[in-house]
Amino acid sequence: MTQMVAGPPAREPTTQRKHRAQIRARTLRTDRWWLGPLATFLGLTGFVVYGLWAAFDPDYFAEPYIAPFSSPCLASSCPEGARLFGWAPVGDWWVLPPALLILAFPGGFRLTCYYYRKAYYRSFWLSPPACAVNEPHRKYTGERRFPLIIQNIHRYFWYVALLIGAILTFDAILAFRDENGNWGHIGLGTVILVVNAALIVLYTISCHSCRHIVAGRLNHFSRHPLRYKAWTYISKLNAKHQQLAWASLVSVIVADLYVRLVAKGIIDFPFA
């Protein structure tokens, strides 16, 4: 005779469906969560305002310093010493400030940067403004439509940003000359330009796209030891990408403004 073992009791059918708690408050957070988005909004707005002013400011070169916002200077209207290897491919037909020839590229790199997307999505669009804070938008379409689909060309901006980082490094090397072209000069401007170039390069190579380009598609790290080693170094930098983004943002403004103050005669070059 087979003994039947009773199973767990059957659940009674229910007509009630469980819903998420309906919270009418925008958030239940009690901390000052709005300070982060506000500080980001003010910082990025200040950068944009300064960039617009610098683009139209004519005092961007003080031998041997060139303001980073205007480098490389590619127009024929550029002073001879400010031209990259004396090269000026854009002729007299370009009547706008020379900085407008190149600012779109580093600006586009930062605008499409993965970290900056999060920063200005939260601070400008409130999408969402902070963790555990309800956003005012009713729907989210992602980055599949214009204009946010442009974010997908970030990897191409990276190649240009890498080139600009190399040019700023070259400018920093030239800053070791004096106003007569003699090597051996080390002024405050030299130090500022060197630090800025280092931070710009570190920010550029700590990018997520750089990490992927170096070894993101490898299936076997053991077959590519050099690329794996480079990937590990860049991964460590990538963990500091946010800090490098802000540090380089501040340094490029400081370096650019310093050169312009020297060019305007507000700071005397022998002490620069």
Image (cartoon, rainbow, N blue to C red):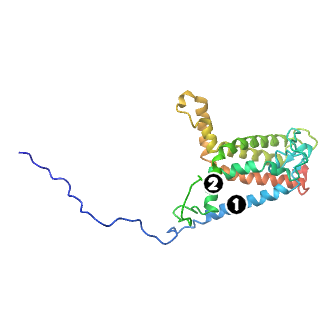
**Res. 158 in view:** yes
Disc 1: CA contacts within 10 A as few (<14), some (14-19) or many (>=20): some
Position of the N terminus, as image quadrant, is top left
Disc number at residue 263?
none
Q: Say if mark 2 contacts mark 1, CB within 8 Å.
A: no
Q: Is residue 162 left or right of residue 235?
A: right
Disc number at residue 148?
2
Could you say where residue 130 lies in the image, as x and y percent from the top left? 56, 62
Q: Which residue ends up furthest to the right in the rendered image?
A: 180
Image quadrant in which you'd find residue 161: top right
Residue beneath the point at 91% across and 39% down: 182
Could you say where residue 258 lies in the image, as x and y percent from the top left? 83, 54
What amino acid type should be assigned to the residue bearing mark 1?
A: Gly
Q: CA distance from mark 2 to mark 1?
A: 22 Å
What amino acid type should be assigned to the residue bearing mark 2?
A: Leu
In the structure shown, which secondary structural element does the residue marked by tag 2 occupy?
A: helix
Q: In the picture shown, does residue 16 fall above or below 99?
A: below
Closest to the observer, 120 or 138: 138
Disc 2: CA contacts within 10 A as few (<14), some (14-19) or many (>=20): few
Q: Which residue ends up furthest to the left in the rendered image?
A: 1
Q: Which residue ends up furthest to the front in the rendered image?
A: 145
Could you say where residue 146 lies in the image, as x and y percent from the top left? 64, 54
Image quadrant in which you'd find residue 91: top right
Could you say where residue 81 lies in the image, as x and y percent from the top left? 90, 43
Q: Earlier in the sequence, mark 2 or mark 1?
A: 1
In the structure shown, which secondary structural element does the residue marked by tag 1 occupy?
A: helix
Residue at label 1? 43
Q: Which residue ends up furthest to the bottom in the rendered image?
A: 24
